[in-house]
Amino acid sequence: PRKIILDCDPGHDDAIALALAHGSPAIDLLAVTTVAGNQTLAKVTRNARAIAATFGLTGVPIAAGADRPLVGDLIVAPDIHGETGLDGPALAEPTDPLDARHAAELIIDTVLAHQPGEVSLVPVGPLTNIALAARLEPRITERVGEVVLMGGAVGPGNRTPVAEFNIWADPEAAHIVFGAPWRVTMIGLDVTHRALATPQVRERIRALGSGPARFVEEMLAFYGGAYRTHQGFSAPPVHDPCAVAYLIDPTMIATRRAPITVELAGAATRGMTVVDLRGPTPAGRHRVALDLDADRFWDVMIDAIARIGADG
Ligand SMILES: Nc1ccc([C@@H]2N[C@H](CO)[C@@H](O)[C@H]2O)cc1
Ligand SMILES: [Ca+2]
């Protein structure tokens, strides 16, 4: 199985990414770290611990990280995720204690405790913790297998016409992450907007009949309503599990090598990922995701939820 660290800001789709990482036999989830983004650090950390308890995820360290972006103020996303950051389902009481380390320290300790290339980072929130870890211990930028992040877009954004929320929330952190020596694969909105929790998908989840399945369904009920109201989607896209799915089966997502630059200074374009798809494929380490096999994605996703339900 692929060993990963999931850095997240739960967040309904972050919770579904946790379900996929925990339930999939192809993933060995070594650690979970939280970052302010969808909601404040306190709220997303509380949510991560409650989600872990609901899914029977124990013995995996959870550490809180940055409570704001590197530069500027924290701007949360209550319209989609609600005041708690996980509106909808009742939240279980956390079981495991919070790890005492900062997220950046847990990331560094975990990567250095494994062989080079063994551990991959899967950030699905603003990239503040990943940037801090790279600056605190630059050796991890040569030791991490790959960074597979949910963020950015080749085409239109969601937080602004051209910027996706995770990058927009901390563009300087994204600039650091894309500029470090590690291999980065960007799973952006072009792909995640195809991972739609349609009524047919939600019926398959409901039919599993387990506690975790009910929890996912209750999350999708709120998340789907918020997406319909605020973004006019008939079915909500679950962005974050797409990044985990890429590590489970890379053939599920079509990628190509492309230079990626983060806009820091544009008045109208700050937080935009500028992806250069022109001309012959360049050299370099960045890859951008361009297409998703949605049927395959949901098969893997629903199988993972079923496996949690069987154990948890
Ligand atoms: N409108 C909206 C804002 C933020 C997010 C969160 N940011 C990323 C998608 O932009 C995902 O990680 C998701 O958790 C999703 C929708
Ligand atoms: Ca997220």
Image (tube, rainbow, N blue to C red):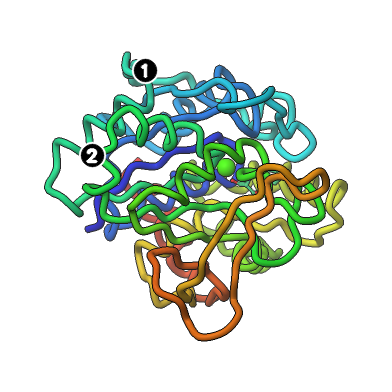
Mark 2 beta carbon near ligand 2 (under 8 Å)? no
Q: Dividing the image into four equal quarters, which quarter contains ligand 2?
A: top right
The label nearer to you, 2 versus 1, is 2
User: Which quadrant would the N terminus be assigned to in this image?
Assistant: bottom left
Residue matched to label 2: 139
Relative depth, front residue between 57 and 140: 140
**Residue type highlighted by circle 1:** Leu
**Residue type highlighted by circle 2:** Arg
Residue 36 visible, this orientation:
yes
Q: Is residue 292 left or right of residue 25?
A: right
**N-term mark: 2 or 1:** 1
Residue matched to label 1: 98
Quarter assignment of residue 312: top left
Relative depth, front residue between 135 and 73: 135
Residue occupying the point 81% across, 62% down = 234
Relative depth, front residue between 86 and 159: 159
Residue 52 in picture, x, y percent from top left: 41, 33
